[in-house]
Image (cartoon, rainbow, N blue to C red):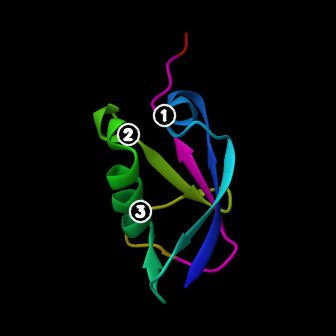
Amino acid sequence: MVTVNLYSYGIARDIVNERKMPLTLEADIVTVGDIRLHLYDKYPRLKSLASLAIGVNDEYVNDDTIVTDQDEIILIPPVSGG
């Protein structure tokens, strides 16, 4: 079992309705892709975002990255600026 701290910002925060929350997954080995699929199942509106980057411990990562207990997972929705 792996428990991570999930942080969300912008529209992702609006969708999950929390800025910070614990997320526990039952598997012994968990990847960022596993977390993404879990979140898409729990919060289907996340799938409608143009992009959703995920960071682990302040670094952008890909879906193959393995996460460990108490990692910080950051949901980074699309941003615009000028």
**Residue 23 badge:** none
Amino acid type at circle 2 is Leu
The numbered mark, 2 or 1, whose residue comes first in the sequence reads 1
Image location (x, y in percent) of residue 42: 39, 52
Q: Is residue 73 left or right of residue 62?
A: right
* Three-letter code for the amino acid on which mark 1 is drawn: Ile
| Residue drawn 64% across the image and 40% down it | 18
Q: Residue at x 34, y 51 (%)?
A: 40
Q: Which mark is residue 15?
A: 1
Depicted 16 relative to depicted 10: above or below: below
Q: Nearer the viewer, mark 3 or mark 2?
A: 2
Name the residue tied to disc 3.
Answer: 62
Q: CA distance from mark 2 to mark 1?
A: 7 Å
Label 3 element class: loop
Front residue of this view, candidates 3 and 60: 3
Q: Is residue 12 left or right of residue 36?
A: right
Q: Amino acid at mark 3?
A: Asn
Report, in whole angstroms, how far the alpha carbon at label 1 lies from the one at label 3: 22 Å
Residue 43 rendering spot, x and y as whole percentages: 39, 45
- The magenta segment is 67-80
The earlier-in-sequence mark between 1 and 3 is 1
Q: Could you tell me which secondary element the residue under label 2 belongs to?
A: helix
Q: Is residue 29 magenta?
A: no
